[in-house]
Amino acid sequence: MSSAAIPANTLDPSAWVVIPLYNEAKVIAGVVAELRTRFPNIVCIDDGSSDGSAAAAAAAGARVVQHPINLGQGAALQTGFEFALAHPECSYVVTFDADGQHRIEDAVAMLRSARDDDIAVVFGSRFLDDRTKPGWLKHVILKTAVWVTNMTTGMKLTDAHNGLRVIRRDALSRIELKQDRMAHATEIVLEIGRTGLPWREQAVELLYTDYSKGKGQSVLNSVNILVDLIVR
């Protein structure tokens, strides 16, 4: 489907947003509400939350699939992929984080790029321009993770662990994540590389909010990525 078929500022029923969700009750309703201005089909995979995240997401208009226990972000994404693929009208999936760090404008631009240029996968990268300010420690850790991912997969990415991606249905159907936790991001890259389908990176801005910094996500998630890459 070409971008001309989806006029600007209108709902896009063929692109499904998949959001792994774990204990983000304070912000998920706002994330879902903003996404619903462009994407009518949003599925949140509640990964064993204990804070009412599932109810907040559903009240904001998302479909919610629940894991009874916390299985990890990779498992949540795989559940979301299978849910989206079960709907024939789904042509693309947009993966989007639940904590408010991604921008809907970037998701829309990446989807347009995938359609216009017949690209199967568009990876968001915070390192293709200087808008994102991750801090020196997070920058070093993430760049180390990128190096490990590129060495492992043979791909040449600048930001291998960015949760904002656009994946076309044919590529999505070939992804089967077995890494439950943070190492799933490298696994996605590996499986996409094996398909031989066209991909690209696109510059995006990540918003390191007071909320995410208050939860300690800025550096801790980066450390978890390295740990998972080492022990997987």
Image (cartoon, helix red, strand yellow):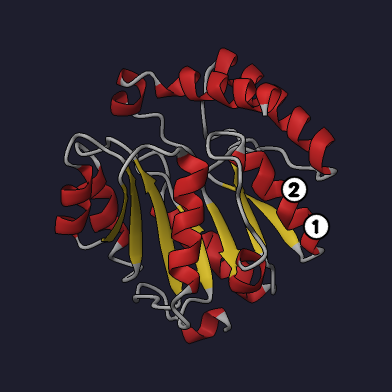
**Foreground of the two, 20 or 207:** 20
**Foreground of the two, 183 or 68:** 68
* Residue name at image x 59 percent, y 27 percent: 225
Image check: 59 left or right of 114?
left
* Residue name at image x 33 percent, y 54 percent: 44
Residue 14 in view of the camera: yes
**Is label 1 in contact with label 2 (beta carbons under 8 Å)?**
yes
* Quadrant of the rendered image containing residue 80: bottom left
Considering every residue shown, the one lying at the far top of the view is 137
Residue type indicated by callout 2:
Leu
In the rendered image, the vertical position of residue 151 relative to residue 84, given as above or below: above
Image check: 147 left or right of 133?
right
Residue count near mark 2 (Cα–Cα under 10 Å), binned few <14, some 14–19, many ≥20: some
Q: Which mark is residue 214?
A: none
Residue 128 in view of the camera: no
Between the C-alphas of marks 1 and 2, the distance is: 6 Å
Residue type indicated by callout 1:
Arg
User: In the picture, which quadrant includes the N terminus?
Assistant: bottom right
* Residue name at image x 50 percent, y 61 percent: 81
User: In the picture, which quadrant includes the C terminus?
Assistant: top right
In the rendered image, the vertical position of residue 153 relative to residue 173, given as above or below: above
Residue, disc 2? 190
Residue, disc 1? 194
Considering every residue shown, the one lying at the far front of the view is 68
Image check: 197 left or right of 206?
right
x%, y% of residue 22?
33, 38
In the rendered image, the vertical position of residue 89 relative to residue 75, given as above or below: below
* Residue name at image x 65 percent, y 38 percent: 159
In the rendered image, the vertical position of residue 129 relative to residue 43, given as above or below: above
